[in-house]
């Protein structure tokens, strides 16, 4: 039988849960490429209106995947990644040599966002109307507002050789805002996008995506009040502490090595509905240059060419929540226990089950509710795109993630604000997103679009430009793009339309 320090146990289990969800989903968003004129079905994830009047007759994503891990607390020295020494056997203190701890924080934050894009299509019905069908497996994990004192105790494993830990022992500490939220779910979407106005230089379109959401698993822990004192590294006192928590029962089996992504969802979550909505305006100063008469009719359907100088967009994404059935012992609890010998606690291989039992037997249950809500990662985005010359563009995109203070449990992405110069040609694209994320960290990325293949990173070039690496973003997609061809014109039947 093994032992673990008590205050850290649940958090450690939740990190273990993160590893499980990463195995089923290897981030939702693709900085830079998602604003391409050739993003097709991939652009829907940030702007549902993007496929109206798109360049494709049909765009199919065969498969795609992405992972986005970020934190503001522990970084890796980039030089040790570049020389690959971090991947080799090291004799000595690994953390002290390869890692750096940010000790200037007020709150520690961690985020993991993963997805798998399964076959999804966008189809042009008419010039003004397009539809799309999307399917994704998504997973998000967040640790928010963790105090630097508790983070340091966790990071060092309560080591008695650490000077900071010795200062924290026999000291009253608190952490009243800490929360952990994690959810994995299937998402099936139907997007409808339409041009709503096209008058001269001004062009408007909108899009709405309705989504059916089916939960795989979820867990949350929120400390409403947490007052604690470590007498030493194995004796803990909790004073008037209150926790809100919940997890699905299948996690008890998953953490025992019995994960099955194809299991029935009936006893895990109710099928939920979510929605994305977006609007786009384009300024087309050379609108009349694109028009012509063909066989006596006015046409302006050059779908293979760009017609805007400036494009502006706004979207609101992932509006909604999902209800989950709580596990048998996953209830809110109170803690008021002094001089608790946590080393005496015994855990079998199924630590989550053991911990639920220990809480039920030693701490006070605070509710009997059998379900909990998990809110989706609601996001507000603004986009601005400027056509510099021919196939050269620059894009500015904001991705703002609100966190609702009165919501008990909600997963969320990471805010970012990027500027992306790009070369955006029919069968080739090159993107260089540069920005700042919600942790205040500067990010440098690069994406390549080579025909049907897209590969990239939103912050991978930080390895070359920064000393400390706090996260990694990478994604790839394989597509089947069927583009509109150039407009065919009869030389005898084409008339200029300037002033038409």
Image (cartoon, helix red, strand yellow):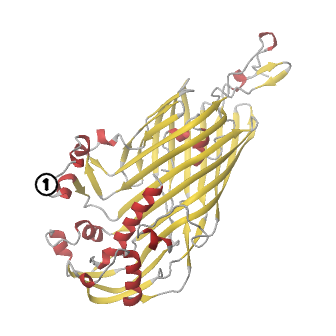
As drawn, which residue projects farthest toward the front?
A: 258
Q: Residue 393 location in percent, x, y?
A: 52, 30
Q: Residue 172 location in percent, x, y?
A: 26, 81
Quadrant containing the C terminus is top right
Mark 1 lies on a secondary structure that is: loop
Quadrant containing the N terminus is bottom left
Q: Label 1 belongs to which residue?
A: 91
Q: Residue 408 location in percent, x, y?
A: 50, 73
Q: Is residue 167 placed above or below 92 in the rendered structure?
A: below
Rendered residue at 64%/65% (across/down): 272
- The quadrant holding residue 316 is bottom right
As drawn, which residue projects farthest toward the top?
A: 492
Residue 267 appears in view: yes
Residue 404 appears in view: no
Rendered residue at 79%/15% (across/down): 495
Q: Residue 331 location in percent, x, y?
A: 48, 82
CA neighbours of label 1 inside 10 A, class few (<14), some (14 to 19), many (20+): few
- The quadrant holding residue 121 is top right
Rendered residue at 38%/60% (across/down): 110
Rendered residue at 78%/13% (across/down): 490
Q: Is residue 348 placed above or below 186 in the rendered structure?
A: below
């Amino acid at each position: 039988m093994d032992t673990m320090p008590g205050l850290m146990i649940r958090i450690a289990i939740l990190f273990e849960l993160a590893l499980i969800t990463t195995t089923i989903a290897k981030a939702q968003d693709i900085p830079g490429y998602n604003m391409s004129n050739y993003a097709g079905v991939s652009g829907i994830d940030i702007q549902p209106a993007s496929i109206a009047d798109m360049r494709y007759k049909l765009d199919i994503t065969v498969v795609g995947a992405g992972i986005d891990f970020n934190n503001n607390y522990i970084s890796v020295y980039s030089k040790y990644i570049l020389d690959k020494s971090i991947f080799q056997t090291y004799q000595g203190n690994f953390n002290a040599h390869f890692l750096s701890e940010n000790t200037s924080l007020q709150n520690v934050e961690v985020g993991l966002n993963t997805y798998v894009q399964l076959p999804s299509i966008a189809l042009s019905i008419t010039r003004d109307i397009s539809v799309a069908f999307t399917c994704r497996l998504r997973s998000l994990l967040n640790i928010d507002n963790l105090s630097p004192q508790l983070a340091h105790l966790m990071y060092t494993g309560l080591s008695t050789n650490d000077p900071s830990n010795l200062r924290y022992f026999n000291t009253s500490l608190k952490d009243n805002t800490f929360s952990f939220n994690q959810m994995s779910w299937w998402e099936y979407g139907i997007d409808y996008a339409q041009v709503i106005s096209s008058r001269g230089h001004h062009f408007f379109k909108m899009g709405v995506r309705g989504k059916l959401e089916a939960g795989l698993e979820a867990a949350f822990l929120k400390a409403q009040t947490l007052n604690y004192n470590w007498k030493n590294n194995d004796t803990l006192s909790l004073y008037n502490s209150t926790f809100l928590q919940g997890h699905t029962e299948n996690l008890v089996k998953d953490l025992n090595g019995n994960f099955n992504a194809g299991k029935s969802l009936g006893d895990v979550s109710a099928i939920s509905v979510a929605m994305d909505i977006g609007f786009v305006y384009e300024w087309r100063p050379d609108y009349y240059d694109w028009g012509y008469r063909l066989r006596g009719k006015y046409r302006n359907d050059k779908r293979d060419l760009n017609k805007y100088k400036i494009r502006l967009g706004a979207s609101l994404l992932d509006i909604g929540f999902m209800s989950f059935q709580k596990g048998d012992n996953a209830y809110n609890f109170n803690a008021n226990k002094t001089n608790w010998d946590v080393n005496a606690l015994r855990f079998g291989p199924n630590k989550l089950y053991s911990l639920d039992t220990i809480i039920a037997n030693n701490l006070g249950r605070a509710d009997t509710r059998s379900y909990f809500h998990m809110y989706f990662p609601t996001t507000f985005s603004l986009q601005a795109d400027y056509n510099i010359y021919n196939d050269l563009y620059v894009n500015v995109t904001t991705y703002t993630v609100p966190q609702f203070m009165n919501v008990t449990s909600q997963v969320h992405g990471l805010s970012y604000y990027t500027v992306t110069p790009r070369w955006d040609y029919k069968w080739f694209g090159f993107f260089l997103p540069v920005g700042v994320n919600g942790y205040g960290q500067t990010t440098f990325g690069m994406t390549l679009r080579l025909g049907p293949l897209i590969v990239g990173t939103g912050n991978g070039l930080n390895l070359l430009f920064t000393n400390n690496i706090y996260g990694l973003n990478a994604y790839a997609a394989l597509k089947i793009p069927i583009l509109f061809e150039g407009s065919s014109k009869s030389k005898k039947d084409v008339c200029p339309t300037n002033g038409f």
